[in-house]
Every structure is written in structure tokens, then in C-alpha cells.
Amino acid sequence: MVRAGREDPELNVLVGEPERRVGRRSFLQVAGLLAAAGAAGYAGGTVAGWGDDDPPAAAGAAAPVSGNRVNERLLNVYNWSDYIDDRTIPLFQAQSNLRVNYDVYSSNDDLLKRMRSGPTSYDIIVPTNNFIPTYLNLDLIEPLRQDLIPNLTNIDREFVDTDYDPGNRYTVPWQWGTTGIGFNRQKAGDAVNSWSAVFQPSAAMGGHVTLLREPTDLIACALIYLGRSPNSIKDSDLADVVKMVRSIKPRLKGFTTDTYIDELAANETWLAQGWSGDVFQAQDQNQDVTYIIPKEGSLRFVDVMAIPKGAPHPSNAARFMNYVLHPKVQARISKYVSYGTPVSLAKPLLPSQQTSDPSIYPPASTKLSIVTLTGPKLEKWQAAYDEIVK
Ligand code: N2P
């Protein structure tokens, strides 16, 4: 199935056809493109007809934006790889007359290490919800200028009444998804329905199986497969996880969070523990690829935009967050990345194949846990993960 889905003329103008994913390799290319667009300048914003949200930048758009620590028309965004279409940033630049530097990472682990290692120039980072308690405890993010984000009212209730950030004082949801298995039906067969496919792979699959390079997903899904609590910090449970995953390492192609889209698409990886939208992006290129949430249950996550403490351009960050919360912008991003939108108002703008797909919007009956990563669990799971991958 081609996930670009049914088109209507208005949406074509708005969403357009994806040209390329902003992934690991392409982000520099895109950053170059964006820099050129920014340097050319779009003062006065002539984006009418592009289906954008706020009015185009006014004549005085070059005036300083108040509330930034550094007085520049600049925004430095650090997001996951393969998590945005290629139109949103250029259109935001045009609309806001702010220049955007867009950089990517591929795991919460990498992001947290980077943020803990000292100040950066990033204005927006996009950690997963279960890391937010840690970011708050470590004083790594700052409260949002909610007055600059009127579109906060567009966010669905379940992403407002959260345990990690009730009322969105620090975070704004980007997209949400599930962890599951992406597999190649020609190579692995149609019958894949259990975590056993990746945690006890058959010899025939040897060298073509990948697991996520992300402690939360690796440990929690292995716990679920072993029938333990996905939130366990019991030493015996974690020891069992370590033992199991270490024992199958000879059959793994490796641990990855940012290469499996291409590898699934290229028939190199046949079974990948992966995130829903990423697998659908592989499916767009290879119709033999499909996605399941294993019968034992799995995880659901929300990736959320936050502002690093002391960021140079917090007001510009708030403007971008407001832009992203517009239903049309949500639809453009969500359509492209095939993840779930936290803004239901965007759903009528999405192809019905996406909004009715239970792999993207699972029914309430699907067993999905939300794990939290706080206190001793962070250290214990990290230690188990390090033991596995070392
Ligand atoms: C984007 C993956 C984001 C999901 N490629 C991980 N939380």
C-alpha cells in the first residue's frame, strides 16, 4: 500500500508529495537547502496558497523578536532522524522570517548524553515522554512561554493531562507511535506475531535481525516477552533480559535506531524491532515490509518538543511550537512520517488509509504500556543495556 494515500487537490497544495526523508545522511543536504532558503530571506512572507497557518510575516518582520537571550532571527532544532517532511521547515522560515538550523540524532541515550555534557546552542530538543522526569530532575529544560503558543489548545486532552508534564508547562507533543516489529514477508513469512521473532530468531534469519539501540525499548520489550512487568527493576528480571539478548547476539545484524528503515527497504534486514512510522517509511519503498505490534503487547510513546535550559532563542522556539501545532502542519508532518498526530483536528486532513490504520492508531484493546524512566530505573536499565551491547 502506498501510504501517501488518497489525495485531494487542496491537500496536494498543502501537503505535497514527499521528496525525501530528512534522515541521517540527507539532513546535511537539507540543512544546506534550508540555509539557502533562509539566506535568500522571505521577509514579507508570500506563502498564501501554501495552506499555512498564521498570517505571513508582517512588513516589520526583520524587527527583533523579544524574549530571546540572543537577539537573532535564528532557531536551532535538534530532532530525531526521519521525523519530518521536507516542506515544514522551509515553509516555517518563509512564514516567520526566522532561519532554522535543523540537526538530527537517533536515540534518547545520545540526546541525553549530549544535553548532560554542557550547554549547547539548541533551542528545541525532542526527547521521548518517558525521559521528561529525568530532564526535569537534572534541570535540563525550561518552562515554555505558553503565551506565545496559543495553538496549545489544539492538543488532544490525553497529551495535556499527562503524568510527565501536566498542562504542557515544559513540553509540546510532536508525534506519537508504538514499538513493534518491522518484517519482510517474503523473507520472514507472514506469520510473525510474537516478540519471539526478534528475541529468539531462527537460524535462518541469522544476520538479518536488528534490535533498537535504545535502552527503554530494548529492555521493556524483552521484559514483556519474558512475561515480566515492562517497568521491572528487579535484578533477577534484568539479569534474564541480559542473558537472553546476549545469547542471540550472534544472530543479530546489530542494534540500530537509524539505519533499519533503509535496511528493511533494501531487503537487508528481514526482522527489525522498530518504531511504527519508521517501518511504514520503509514500506513506502518496499511493499514486502510490514509492521505488527506483537501479541504479548508493546510500548507506546510520545516524542515531545522541549527547550533546553538557557537556550539562546526560547521565543523563536515557542513560535515554532505554535506553528507545528497547527492542524495543517500536523497533517503535513504526520502524513509524511506515518506517526500519530496529537492534534485530532489534523485527522480530517490526513489520508483515510492512515487514520483508519490500526497500526498507526491502535484500538484501545491493543496492549500498550507507557514506561517511565525515573530514579533507580534509569541507572539499572542503562547498566543492563550496557551489559548487552558491550
Ligand atoms: C523517528 C523515530 C522516533 C521515535 N525516526 C522514537 N521515539
Image (cartoon, helix red, strand yellow):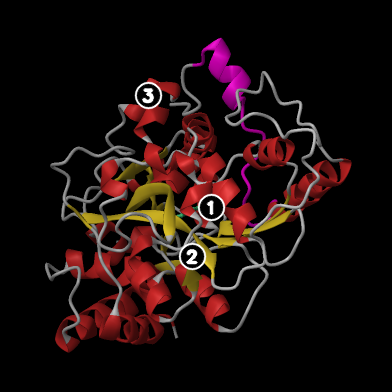
- Few, some or many C-alpha atoms within 10 Å of disc 1 (few <14, some 14-19, many ≥20)? some
In the rendered view, would you say 141 is above or below 93?
below
Horizontal and vertical percent for residue 360? 34, 38
Say whether disc 2 or disc 1 marks the residue closer to the N-terminus. Answer: 2
Q: Amino acid at mark 2?
A: Thr
Judge whether residue 133 is colored magenta: no
In the rendered view, would you say 157 is above or below 206?
above
Q: Hey, which quadrant is residue 86 in on the image?
A: top right
Q: Which residue is mark 2?
A: 256
**Cα–Cα span, label 2 and label 1:** 10 Å
| Local secondary structure at mark 1 | helix
Q: Amino acid at mark 1?
A: Glu
Horizontal and vertical percent for residue 83? 53, 48
Horizontal and vertical percent for residue 294? 23, 51
Q: Which residue is mark 1?
A: 263
**Considering depth in this image, is 97 or 380 the residue closer to the camera?**
97
Is 23 situated left or right of 350 in this image?
A: right
| Local secondary structure at mark 2 | loop
Say whether disc 2 or disc 3 marks the residue closer to the N-terminus. Answer: 2
> Is the Cβ of the residue at disc 1 closer than 8 Å to that at disc 3?
no
Horizontal and vertical percent for residue 53? 57, 30
Q: Which residue is mark 3?
A: 353
| Residue for point 16% across, 55% down | 296
Please state the extent of the stretch shown in magenta in the rendering: 7-26
